[in-house]
Amino acid sequence: MSLTANWSYPTSIRFGAGRISEVADACAVAGIKNPLLITDRGLAQMEITTNTLDLLETAGLGRALFADVDPNPNEKNAEAGVRAYQDGGHDGVVAFGGGSGLDLGKLVAFLAGQTRPLWDFEDIGDWWTRADADAIAPIVAVPTTAGTGSEVGRASVITNSVTQEKKIIFHPKFLPTVVICDPELTVGMPKFITAGTGLDAFAHCVEAFCSPHYHPMSQGMALEGMRLVKEYLPRAYADGTDLEARAHMMSAAAMGATAFQKGLGAIHALSHPIGAMYHTHHGTTNAVCMPAVLQFNKPAVTEVLAQAANYLDIPDGFDGFCRYVDSLNDSLGIPKSLTDLGLTTVDVDRVVAGALSDPSRGGNPVEMTQQNTKELLLKIL
C-alpha cells in the first residue's frame, strides 16, 4: 500500500516521504514570496532544517530563519519573532518543527499584523473576533515530530512567563494553508522524543474519544488514531528508521489534533500547568498523568473505553484498556509518577488552580472540583 496522498481535510495536506521537496511550491500556493522559517533552537542547525532553507533559497524565496524558541514557547519568543518577521519584510511563515516551533510560527503569522496585545486573543468566549482576520499572514506548516498535531490546529499554546501559565491563543486562521507531512523528517528523533510525542498523540485521541461533547467525525478519527498508535508507536520506538511506522505515527498525530475539536480533559488540564511551572516535556507529562486520570474518569468512561478496547483488540474492556496503557508506558520508558519525572517539590494548590482554570477541563467527562482534582494530583505525584 502506498503511503503517499493529498488530503484537504482538515486543510490541504501533502503527505508522504520526500515531500519536503515541495516546500517552495507550498509557499506559492499559500501566496508566500518571502517566508520566515520559524523553528526551535535545537533544530536550527540540523540537516533537515538547513536542507529546507536550501530548497527555499534555490526557489528564490530567500533564506530567513528565526529560532529563538523555547521548548514551552512564551510571549518573549513571540515578541522577538514578530520583530524578526517585520524587520525582514516577510509575507508568510514556514512553521517547522515539533509543537514549540509550530505553535510559535503560527502565532507570529497571526500577531505580526495585529494592533492589540497577545493576551487579548486568549481562547475565552469570542475573544478571537477581536483580531483583524485580513492581517493574518499565510502559514505553511512542516511537522518534524509525530505528537502535537499543531500543524492542523487552530490554536497555539503559549506560556505566560510572568504568571507561569499556559494559555491557548485561538483563531480559525491559525490553521495553515498547506501542511507538508514528510515522515522522513522524523527519522532522526531520539527514543524519548518518539515516546513522548507519540503518547501525546495517544492522549489527544483518548481524551477526545471520552469527551462528552457531540462530534461523531472526531469520535471516529480518535478511535482510528488510537489504533495507529497501538500498532506503530512500538515499532517507531524500536527502530527509528522504520519509515512505515513513522508515517502512520505522523497520521495519528494529525488525527489526534483534529479529533480534539471534540474536547480534551483532565490529562491536559493537569499537564498544562505542570509544564508551565516545571518545564516538563508535554507529551511525557500527559503519559504520566493518563493512568490516574483514566481511573478518575472510570464512572463516566467504562462503557466508551470498552468500545475502544474492542476495536483495538484489547480484552477485558475498560480494565483491559487501563492495563494496556500501563504496559505501553512501561515499554516506552515512561516514569511512573511526577516524582520519577524529576519533580521533587510541587506546589499542589497552584497546579490544581491552574488545572481548574484550563480550557481542557471543560471536556473532562467527570466534573473537576477543587477537592477531587487535588486528590487526583496527589495520586500522580
Image (cartoon, rainbow, N blue to C red):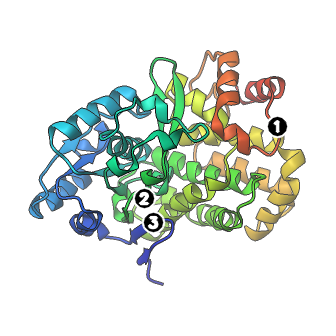
Dot 1 falls on a residue whose secondary structure is loop
Q: Which mark is residue 28?
A: none
Task: Indicate which label's residue lies in the foreground, 2 or 1.
Answer: 1
Residue 290: where, in percent of width, then height?
70, 42
Give the residue pinned by disc 2: 240
Give the residue pinned by disc 1: 367
Q: Give the residue drawn at x 59%, y 22%.
A: 343
Q: Is residue 5 above or below residue 37?
A: below
Q: Give the residue drawn at x 83%, y 28%.
A: 372
Dot 2 falls on a residue whose secondary structure is loop
**Residue type, numbered disc 2:** Gly
Q: Give the residue drawn at x 62%, y 53%.
A: 260
Residue 137 lies left or right of residue 261; in this view the side is left
Residue 292 lies left or right of residue 166; in this view the side is right
Residue 229 position by quadrant? bottom right
Distance from disc 3 to disc 2, alpha carbons, whole Å, reads 28 Å
Looking at the image, which is closer to me, 115 or 160? 115
Q: Give the residue drawn at x 57%, y 53%.
A: 201
Q: Can the viewer see residue 156 in this picture? A: no
Task: Indicate which label's residue lies in the foreground, 3 or 2.
Answer: 3
Looking at the image, which is closer to me, 98 or 92? 92
Q: Quadrant of the C terminus?
A: top right
Distance from disc 3 to disc 1, alpha carbons, whole Å, reads 33 Å
Mark closest to the chain's N terminus, 2 or 1: 2
**Residue type, numbered disc 3:** Thr
Q: Which mark is residue 11?
A: 3
Distance from disc 2 to disc 1, alpha carbons, whole Å, reads 40 Å
Mark closest to the chain's N terminus, 3 or 1: 3
**Residue type, numbered disc 1:** Glu
Q: Is residue 376 above or below residue 22?
A: above
| Residue count near mark 2 (Cα–Cα under 10 Å), binned few <14, some 14–19, many ≥20 | some
